[in-house]
Amino acid sequence: MLITKMPGYSKPTIAIYPFMWHQLVGVWIMWAYKFQPDGTLKWMRHYVEDENGTAKAERYMNFAEANADAKKFNQSIRDRVYALDVSEEQKVSISLKAEKAITAEERLASEEQLMLNESIKRTVDFPKPKRESLILPKEGEDYRDDLYQCLTESPKIEFARLASHRITLRRKGDLDWSTVFYTNEKTGQLCFRERIASGFDLSGKAHWGETKAQIRALLLPRANQLLQLTSVQRMLDEALAKGQHVIVVGSFVFWYEEGKDVGWTVKSIGGASKSKDGDTIWKEGKIVSKNHGRIVVLPYIKENGELVQGHTKNSSKDGKAKPRHPDYYLELPFEVLDGDLMIGLFGELPYE
């Protein structure tokens, strides 16, 4: 079909972002955040033209390439919004909504890619089954090689999506994979989550928000090891020389405090208590720390344009953060670096 005939073609594209296509393993599909006639924004499939002039989905085989293309396109969000025939007030609101949506999706995707990479590393020495020992469904001998490859990478999973066969298998016991499970977008998402969670001895079936919170806590000590890397030390020394005491990379924050035996530490990044983690970052704002909380909430802009300064806090499970004396409140600027950098930095660490 011609691209001009595809749903939503005539609607203005404000931003784009890749979403994982859970039906297939390792495939990312670009979606467009489009301005609707009623003034709202809606995610719709993004299409490009092939060599024959017909429409096709924009597919990527890795997240890094897809994310890089989206970032390049999204640098001009404000320009596209300000070309719309709407009021100035609407333009500000639309821009903030689009930037918030992209921030939320980028944080989510980058964090889950980091967690997946780390999950695979954690099971690299876990005993793998022998290919010939796997028990398969009746007439399912063709699945053996693909299932073995899945278990070689993620040996603890309870669900396996075999993309080339468009089938999902469920484990019963150590080697019995004879149960065929439902195969759709929802179970594809379950299999992806299982690949992440299983490496941390957690379940992809559990509440995903709570599972990721547990994984973040497990990753924090490992993130602290980054402070020993020469490349990271150089990056932080350069930041300190420029007067920057807070560097945000992905889901972690490198935090510097003056004083004996303090220096650089690593904290977790968090969202505002009543908003999704994806509010548009107020880059000109500062973080005002009145306590020793382990979570940093960055300055952000609400969709109504209200500016909110950043702060530190503890999670609800940690109890109240130890307060600072008013004479020692910190008011710090910050810098946000590429979230993909955290994935790369983790990759530099030799695994224990």
Image: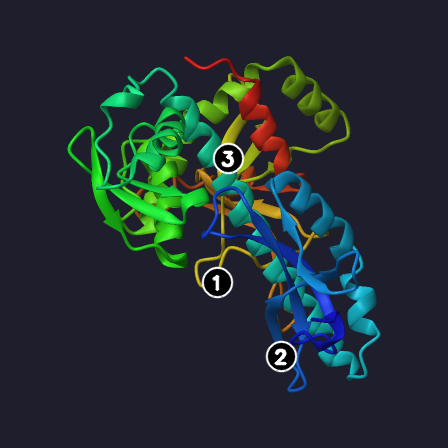
Mark 2 Cα shell of 10 Å, populated few (<14), some (14-19), many (≥20): few
Residue shown at 41%/49% (left/top)?
166
Residue shown at 82%/73% (left/top)?
82
Is residue 346 among the parts visible in the rendering?
yes
Q: Amino acid at mark 1?
A: Ser
Q: Which residue is mark 1?
A: 275
Farthest residue, direction left = 173
Farthest residue, direction front = 139
SS at circle 1:
loop
Front residue of this view, candidates 277 and 173: 173
Q: Which residue is mark 2?
A: 40
Give the quarter of the image for residue 293.
top left
Of callouts 1 and 2, which one flags the residue occurring earlier in the amino acid sequence? 2
Give the left or right position of residue 243, taking residue 184 as reference: right
Give the left or right position of residue 135, taking residue 20 as reference: left
Front residue of this view, candidates 45 and 204: 45
Residue 134, horizontal then vertical, whole percent? 24, 28
Q: Which residue is mark 3?
A: 114
Farthest residue, direction bottom = 38
